[in-house]
Amino acid sequence: MSAVETSSARNLPSLWRERVAWLLLAVYLALVVRYAWNPTPFAELLAAIGIASALAHCTLTYGWKNTLAFVAICLVVTFALENVGSLTGALFGRYHFEIGAQFPHVGVIPIIVGPLWFGMGYFAWTVAGTLLGGADRNLNRQLNILAQPVVAAFVMTQWDFVMDAPTSTISRAWIWLDGGADFGVPLMNYVGWLLTSWTFYQLFALYLISTGEVRPIRRNRGLRLAAILFYAFSGLTHLTPWLMGQSGEVADASGHIWRIQDLRETTVAVMLFTMFFTSMLAALRLARDEGS
């Protein structure tokens, strides 16, 4: 057997593992599009798989120590600000959670909320880094230490901008007591999301700078693409209820009446021109930039 044949034989198990991983990801993303829009126990299972995937992805990219730092920073910041927001009405407006009542709470916030911030927060961080040409692995260059957290915060807030109106007004997973112009959601909520996500992103970036570990362990293009897909398909799930053509009306907590089909169609429009467009740009940047 020649050296080339020997090398090819050795790479076969790795190649098959990669193919299986992509197949499993495709199945998962298909299930997300079909079921994740509706907060059922199965949707909660899909969310748990997504969080576990973010944890594994972050560990492969940054190593265990930095992953634990990211998780710790994210959870401390989000639970602190969510509790302040829920108790005072500051940051996000007056709201409370209906979902997760059966779970333990950190203060008045269901424990599942923090991991959800981390899961999508990590993927949004990677998408932002790709948009910025790898700023997340070159934080000590030029303005990357500021640009990466700011862009990541906007990418993260886009996810909330897409999902908050249907999830709070139709599904009532959480409720704004005073309603809001965005189908029952106040503008203040999105400002709060931007501030919260920027805070933990900036702290993580400063942590990486302080430790001297400004470069991820791996720069695998496949890992970046997977992160982009996780982010994109969490938005594409809103196509399903819109295509189902739900009819009827729903009232927010303030008593304002909204047409469900209007809400669903607006959600899809917002998704296409925020999360989907951002994901497309990141994928194109990844395809063009051989250094990613």
Image (spheres, rainbow, N blue to C red):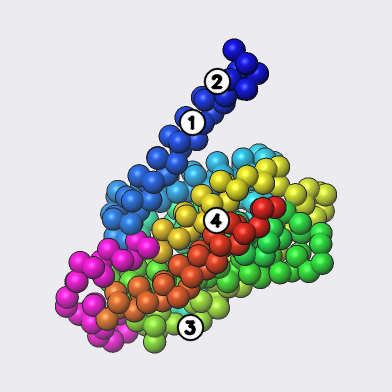
User: Which numbered circle lies on residue 9?
Assistant: 2
How much space separates mark 1 and mark 2, taking CA atoms? 14 Å
Q: Which residue is mark 4?
A: 123
Closer mark to the observer between disc 3 and disc 2? 2
Closer mark to the observer between disc 1 and disc 4? 1
Report the side of 276 relative to 56 (left or right): left
How much space separates mark 1 and mark 4, taking CA atoms? 22 Å
User: Which numbered circle lies on residue 187?
Assistant: 3
Q: Quadrant of the N terminus?
A: top right
- Which residue is located at x 45 percent, y 67 percent? 276
Quadrant of residue 232 within the rendered picture: bottom left
Count of picture labels: 4
- Which residue is located at x 29 percent, y 74 percent? 264
Q: Helix, strand or loop at disc 4?
A: helix
Q: Is residue 257 magenta?
A: yes
Q: Helix, strand or loop at disc 3?
A: helix
How much space separates mark 3 and mark 2, taking CA atoms? 57 Å
- Which residue is located at x 63 percent, y 69 percent? 151
Report the side of 281 relative to 99 (left or right): right
